[in-house]
Image (tube, helix red, strand yellow):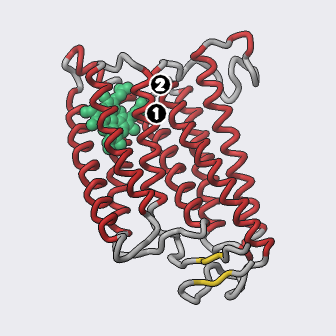
Amino acid sequence: MALSLSSGSLASRGAPAAALSPQTSRLRRHLVQLLAHLLVALVALVAIGGATRVMEAGLACPDWPLCYGSLLPAGRMTVQVFLEWFHRLDAFLVGIGLLVLALISLLKRASLPFWLPPLCCTAVLLVALQGALGALTVTQLLRFDIVTAHLGTALLLVALVSVMTRGLSIDAPRSDTATPWLGLAAAAVYLQCIGGGLMASQWATGRCLSLQQACLWLDLHRFGAVTSALLVLLVSALLLRSEATRPSGRVPLLLASLLLVGVQLGLGLLSLRLALAQPLVTVAHQLVAALLVAVLSAALPRPTGQQILLDASR
Ligand code: HEM
């Protein structure tokens, strides 16, 4: 297998300029696969977390880290206990996966891009923080700020793993003039998610719809939805137009973000129209939010901004 760099510069500190050994390219491919699986598991984790909240299952396991003092509380299994237990299991597996990834990236750092080990270690720290927040969520009886911080850290992990997956892939976009705009759109969507989390964890929607209380949260969320959706639409549409003259390989991601933002607005409006009576719609709203964060983060440039071209004869 042959490799060349489009800029003629090193893609990673310690990697040979002209060629990567077959072992190194195999290692990279395996790491991309592991990262992609972790990304799917993380997005699923956010959706399961949403289902746990909607089904009011956040305290279904009253203790932590075990559930009813057991690894598998078979005798106590209800839908609620299953959701909370499965949420913890998925989180545990993601944590192990990220730890393994960080160890490999440290051991094999000479053949990997220099940014990978620090980002992997950051992910491990975030997952440890997430575990602590998960424990506090239970012990502090679903305090809204802790529940929201738990969602915020989960979405940061989604963004980070998405950036790493894409950055390690061969066709990752390089830094260009679009980068700050994409960053702004991703940040706006992230903030909108935090606002959604604050609203949901205080049960503000139901209180507004039935008692006309805490409606400010809903008004803020509507305003944020319009602003962030317009930003995503504008940035994606403009970048799609410029793809013809300056291709960056982002087309599928930009199209996906356009689609997801439309679906997200539809789901938000539908969940309001249904007065949150359909848990599946509310959970889908949280799932699409996580997907949007993942897609916009993947459209960001690789951390080094350098392009690796792998030969097709690999
Ligand atoms: C870019 C657009 C949007 C994003 C990224 C977004 C994201 C989110 C997130 C992450 C949550 C928290 C979910 C949870 O913790 O269960 C949420 C909640 C919510 N969102 Fe959105 N949202 C968007 C647009 C909208 C729109 C247009 C509406 C309708 C006007 C809407 C209505 C709601 C409602 C009613 C909740 C609370 C659900 C509950 O209390 O269980 N959202 N949103």
Callout in the foreground (2, 1) = 2
Q: Position of residue 50 (x, y in %)?
A: 48, 30
* Residue receiving disc 2: 53
Q: Position of residue 207 (x, y in %)?
A: 27, 19
Query: In the structure shown, which secondary structural element does the residue marked by tag 2 occupy?
Result: helix
What number is the disc on residue 275?
Answer: none
Instruction: Name the one closer to the observer, 216 or 249.
Output: 249
Contact flag, marks 2 and 1 (Cβ < 8 Å) = yes
Label 2 CB-ligand 1 distance < 8 A: yes
Name the residue: 64% across, 38% down.
Answer: 91
Label 1 CB-ligand 1 distance < 8 A: yes
Q: Position of residue 58 (x, y in %)?
A: 53, 23
Instruction: Name the one closer to the observer, 124 or 238.
Output: 238
Q: Amino acid at mark 1?
A: Val
Q: Amino acid at mark 2?
A: Arg
Q: CA distance from mark 2 to mark 1?
A: 9 Å
Q: Is residue 76 left or right of residue 226?
A: right
Q: Is residue 71 left or right of residue 214?
A: right
Corner quadrant of residue 72: top right
Name the residue: 43% across, 31% down.
Answer: 284
What number is the disc on residue 147?
Answer: 1
Considering every residue shown, the one lying at the far top of the view is 75
The image shows a total of numbered marks equal to 2
Name the residue: 69% across, 11% down.
Answer: 76
Q: Is residue 236 left or right of residue 19?
A: left
